[in-house]
Amino acid sequence: MIIVAKWVIILFGIFLVGVGFLMLLAPKKARAILRKAGSTPFINYAEITLRLIPAISLIVYADYSKFPLHCFYFGSFMLLTSIVLYFIPVAKHHGFSLRAADILKPLYLQLISPFSMLFGWLVIYMVI
């Protein structure tokens, strides 16, 4: 169980780094993906359910990580926000993602992309 949680967290970190590169190199595509968040019931609930996997892994692995409290609290935050999102109407979630995509112009996505990459590397570092 612990080994699986560790690898899920590593894959989550790689995902965050990849999202950072997508925002840097193809910001219009990243923006288009953001616009699809919560667009259908399937996408909405699949997205939320997929968030639960690294969230639970962070909680399970917290005692073994380099930063146990940070790992536990980050995982707990992800878990709680995922649970809350299950009760938010799909249209409201999608509306939020559309507004966020309108605000996050391609240049802004490129400017914040290093933060996603850095955070992904920190997540990986936390467990290796």
Image (cartoon, helix red, strand yellow):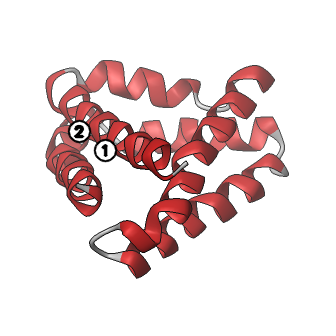
Q: Secondary structure at mark 1?
A: helix
Crowding near the residue tagged with mark 1, few <14, some 14–19, many ≥20 C-alpha atoms within 10 Å:
many
29 up-or-down from 70: above or below: above
Which residue is drawn at the image coordinates 84% and 43% (left, top)? 89
Q: Are marks 1 and 2 in contact (CB under 8 Å)?
A: yes
Count of numbered marks: 2
Q: Nearer the viewer, residue 50 or 89?
A: 50
What amino acid type is highlighted by mark number 1?
A: Gly
Kind of residue at badge 2: Val
Q: Residue 68: give x, y in percent of width and height.
A: 39, 76
Question: In the image, is 113 to the left or to the right of 38?
Answer: left
Q: Which residue is mark 2?
A: 17
Please provide percent x and percent y for residue 71.
42, 69
Q: Residue at x 73, y 51 (%)?
A: 85
Residue 79 location, x and y as percent?
64, 59
Q: Residues within 10 Å of mark 2 (few under 14, many from 20)?
A: many
The structure residue drawn at horizontal position 80% and vertical position 25%, both measured from the top left corner, is 41
Q: Is residue 128 left or right of residue 60?
A: left
Q: Nearer the viewer, residue 45 or 70?
A: 70
Residue 13's label in the rendered image is 1
Residues 51 and 64: in front is 64
Q: Is residue 75 above or below residue 112?
A: below
Dot in front, 1 or 2: 1
At x 43% / y 21%, what residue is drawn? 32
Q: What is the secondary structure assignment of the residue under circle 2?
A: helix
The residue nearer to you, when weighing 69 against 112, is 69
Disc 1 to disc 2, C-alpha distance: 6 Å
| Residue 80, image x, y percentages | 68, 64
Q: Say which quadrant the C terminus sits in.
A: bottom left
Instruction: Indicate left or right for 87 with 79 as reference.
Output: right
Q: Quadrant of residue 42?
A: top right
